[in-house]
Image (spheres, rainbow, N blue to C red):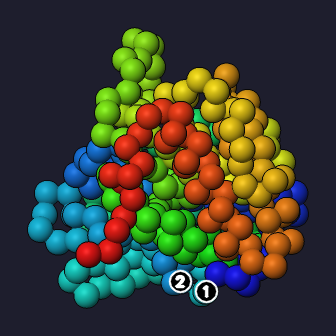
């Protein structure tokens, strides 16, 4: 945890990142359609593995068998495995378009008798047209993808270590494919405030209860660098004035509420980046939990 993870500047791999994001959305939508619902959308997420990213086991529609879709970033291939002992894969390479990716994946599933119908367009991501027609996004830089996965593995481990200290309801560390962020969320057990009628179904389920959430994302059009974040919902009064660790972490405005922000590249300069990241996560949690009146003592894990 003390070893510094690799650098991940956004611009050199931005086209690959967008292509990979669209790949993730296609696979994530398959999980959405096949897995039984779980609270706060936990059933739709992807998970970091020692070789890449996976959906985990999914049931055959209408059957008793299971299948799994995994991105193998060591071999750079998309893999389909079934509980019948079947295995199929195709290469992930520079030039593979989003449309071609979807066709190859769904052809593999059809070959195994897996029929899944998804909403065939990106979620909250351009271009807003059928995945089959997206040919302009076709960048896959293997070195950059491998580097991104190495970062995710490192973050996943630190987040998992952090999660071990909480004794309340808490989600697994998982990747939300809609914004491509790796996240961990804690819950107070209390219901959240009633949302406005025009709030989306996704928002109503995600924020049905009070949360303190932590995440990592690789950057986007607005945030031009990889970074860590944390927010408390609903945001308590005075949260943005509390102290964060390390001293270069800061509160930024996010849709009218304070969000704790830590630059990934700044963190990499530390001699013990894992420890410093834990300091950030703990300081953000304590800030939100104290201001929101959570029972911190009750939620602190104590070995038996």
Crowd tier of the residue under label 1, counting other residues whose Cα lies within 10 Å: few below 14, some 14–19, many 20 or above: few
Residue drawn 33% across and 52% down? 298
Residue drawn 41% across and 40% down? 294
Quadrant for the N terminus in the image = bottom right
Quadrant for the C terminus in the image = bottom left
Crowd tier of the residue under label 2, counting other residues whose Cα lies within 10 Å: few below 14, some 14–19, many 20 or above: some
Q: Count of labels shown?
A: 2
Residue drawn 73% across and 84% down? 3
Front residue of 7/161: it is 161
The image quadrant that residue 195 belongs to is top left
Q: Is 208 placed left or right of 35 in the picture?
A: right
Label 2 residue SS: loop
Q: Is 232 placed left or right of 64 in the picture?
A: right
Q: Is residue 83 above or below residue 300?
A: below
Front residue of 145/49: it is 49
Residue 285 visible in the snapshot: yes
- Is label 1 in contact with label 2 (beta carbons under 8 Å)? yes
The x, y position of residue 68, in whole percent, is: 35, 72
Q: Is residue 234 above or below residue 37?
A: above
Q: Earlier in the sequence, mark 1 or mark 2?
A: 2
- What residue is pinned by disc 2? 51
Task: Give the label on residue 74, or none.
Answer: 1
The x, y position of residue 218, in whole percent, is: 72, 57
Q: Is residue 192 above or below residue 176?
A: above
The x, y position of residue 36, in whole percent, is: 22, 52
The x, y position of residue 254, in whole percent, is: 68, 31
Front residue of 302/276: it is 302
């Amino acid at each position: 945890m003390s070893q510094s993870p690799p650098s991940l500047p956004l611009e050199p791999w931005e086209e690959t990142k967008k292509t990979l994001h669209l790949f993730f959305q296609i696979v994530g939508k398959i999980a959405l359609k096949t897995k039984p619902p779980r609270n706060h959308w936990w059933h739709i997420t992807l998970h970091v593995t020692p070789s890449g990213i996976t959906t985990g086991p999914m049931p055959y529609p209408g059957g008793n068998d299971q299948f799994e879709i995994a991105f193998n970033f060591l071999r750079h291939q998309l893999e389909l495995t079934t509980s019948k002992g079947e295995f199929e894969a195709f290469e992930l390479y520079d030039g593979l378009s989003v449309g071609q990716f979807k066709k190859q994946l769904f052809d593999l599933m059809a070959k195994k008798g897996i029929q899944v119908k998804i909403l065939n367009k990106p979620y909250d991501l351009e271009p807003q047209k059928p995945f089959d027609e997206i040919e302009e996004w076709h960048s896959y830089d293997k070195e950059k993808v491998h580097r991104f996965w190495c970062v995710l593995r490192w973050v996943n481990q630190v987040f998992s270590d952090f999660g071990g200290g909480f004794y309340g309801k808490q989600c697994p560390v998982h990747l939300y494919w809609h914004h491509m962020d790796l996240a961990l969320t804690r819950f107070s057990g209390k219901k959240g405030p009633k949302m406005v009628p025009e709030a989306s179904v996704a928002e109503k389920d995600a924020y049905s209860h009070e949360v303190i959430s932590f995440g990592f994302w690789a950057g986007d059009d607005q945030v031009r660098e990889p970074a860590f974040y944390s927010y408390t919902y609903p945001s308590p009064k005075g949260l943005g004035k509390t102290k964060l660790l390390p001293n270069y972490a800061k509160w930024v405005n996010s849709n009218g509420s304070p969000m704790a922000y830590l630059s990934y590249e700044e963190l990499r300069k530390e001699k013990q980046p894992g420890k410093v990241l834990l300091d950030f996560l703990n300081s953000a949690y304590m800030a939100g939990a104290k201001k929101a009146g959570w029972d911190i003592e009750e939620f602190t894990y104590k070995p038996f």
